[in-house]
Amino acid sequence: MVDKVVDKKGTRQVAEAYLKYLYSPEGQEIAAKNFYRPRDPNVAKKYANEFPKLKLFTIDQEFGGWTKAQKEHFSNGGTFDQISQR
């Protein structure tokens, strides 16, 4: 959710409600039934046979958190800029 956008359009309340539902057990169940990998551990366990096993990680584990990852990879002159210039 982009704060500037939802505040400008007056859609913050509905956007937050959507995200809350999307990550609820019921929302995760709907996602899994439609072939999206669920984030909820209980729902993921129920649908484990539907998805190949992956070694999942978090930004904190692999990149030291979003602040560090943003600075290193996406700031001006960061990794993304270096790759996209080639």
Image: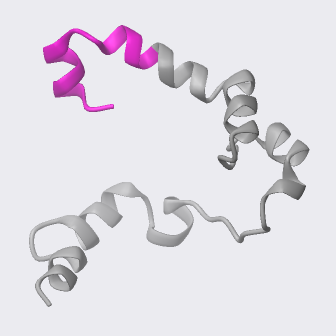
Task: Tell whether 54 sits left or right of 23.
Answer: right
Q: Which residues are magenta?
A: 1-16
Q: Residue furthest bottom?
A: 86
Horizontal placement of 33 versus 66: left or right?
right
> Which quarter of the picture shows residue 15?
top left
| Count of labels in the image | 0
Q: How is the image coloured?
A: one colour
- Taking the image as shown, residue 45 lies to the left or right of residue 54, namely right
Give percent across and percent down for residue 64.
45, 66
Q: Is residue 43 above or below residue 15?
A: below
Viewer-closest of 18 and 65? 18
Give coordinates of residue 74: x percent, y percent.
22, 66
Residue at 27% x, 72% y is 73
The residue that appears at 49% across and 61% down in the rendered structure is 59
Residue 40 to residue 70: above or below: above
- For the stretch drawn in magenta, the main secondary structure is helix
Q: Is residue 56 above or below residue 39?
A: below
**Residue 74 drawn in magenta:** no
Side of 60 where 56 appears, left or right: right
Q: Residue at x 73, y 22 (%)?
A: 26
6 falls in the magenta region: yes
Vertical placement of residue 13 versus 57, above or below? above
Q: Provide residue 86's location: percent of width, then percent of height.
A: 14, 90
Q: Nearer the viewer, residue 25 or 59?
A: 25
Residue in the foreground of this view, choosing between 64 and 76: 76
Dividing the image into 4 quarters, which one contains the N terminus?
A: top left
Q: Position of residue 24 (x, y in %)?
A: 67, 24
Q: Looking at this rendering, what residue extends furthest in the front direction?
A: 34
